[in-house]
Amino acid sequence: MADLSVNFAGIKSPNPFWLASAPPTNMGSMVERAFDAGWGGAVWKTLGEPIVNVSSRLASLDQGALRMIGLNNIELITDRPLEVNLKEIYECKKKYPGHAVIVSLMVESKREAWHEIVKKSQDTGADGFELNFGCPHGMSERGMGAAMGQVPEYTCMVTEWV
């Protein structure tokens, strides 16, 4: 069998096939099942505080006269408590040390909030962080996600904080 292992930016994984931050990476059991199925890495569903939910989670995707040709996911960050996620990330990384685990993070544009969540996430043993400056699904009123990523000065500021 061919060796598909990769070293990307110092992060090693058994292969280049990783799951993105999305509903399938929302909990440890799901990420572990993915690793057992052969995935090489996962970006954990975006963590942040406080948890904010909207309803409904799915919106129809229409095209011209065609109704509902697909669904658009409008889910925000994980709805699970931060401490539960951090514990599961730690356990997952301990159980699968050769697989890549990246933690996606999105909090308000406050230095203290970023420092706190990064410190807590570092303690899990995760291989890296995704600073979520691109999520288009809400929270722009709090300066999060794409609202931050669209302003280079904000992106630079938070990256320097971290």
Image (tube, helix red, strand yellow):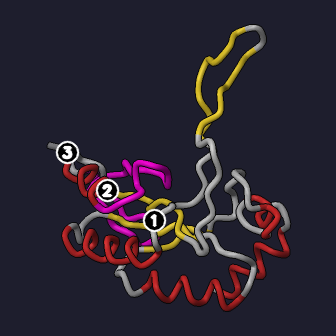
Is residue 26 one of those drawn in magenta? yes
Counting from the top left corner in percent of width and height, residue 140 is at 79, 61
Q: Earlier in the sequence, mark 1 or mark 3?
A: 3
Which mark is in front, 2 or 3?
Answer: 2
Q: Is residue 52 left or right of residue 20?
A: right
Residue for badge 1: 80
Name the residue rendered at 68%, 88% in the picture.
161
Identify the image quadrant of the C terminus.
bottom right
- Rounded to the nearest angstrom, the CA distance separating label 2 from label 3 is 24 Å
Which mark is in front, 1 or 3?
Answer: 1
Residue for badge 2: 31
Dot 3: what SS? loop
- Rounded to the nearest angstrom, the CA distance separating label 1 from label 2 is 15 Å
Kindly identify the amino acid type of the residue bearing the numbered disc 1: Arg
Q: Earlier in the sequence, mark 2 or mark 3?
A: 3
- Rounded to the nearest angstrom, the CA distance separating label 1 from label 3 is 38 Å
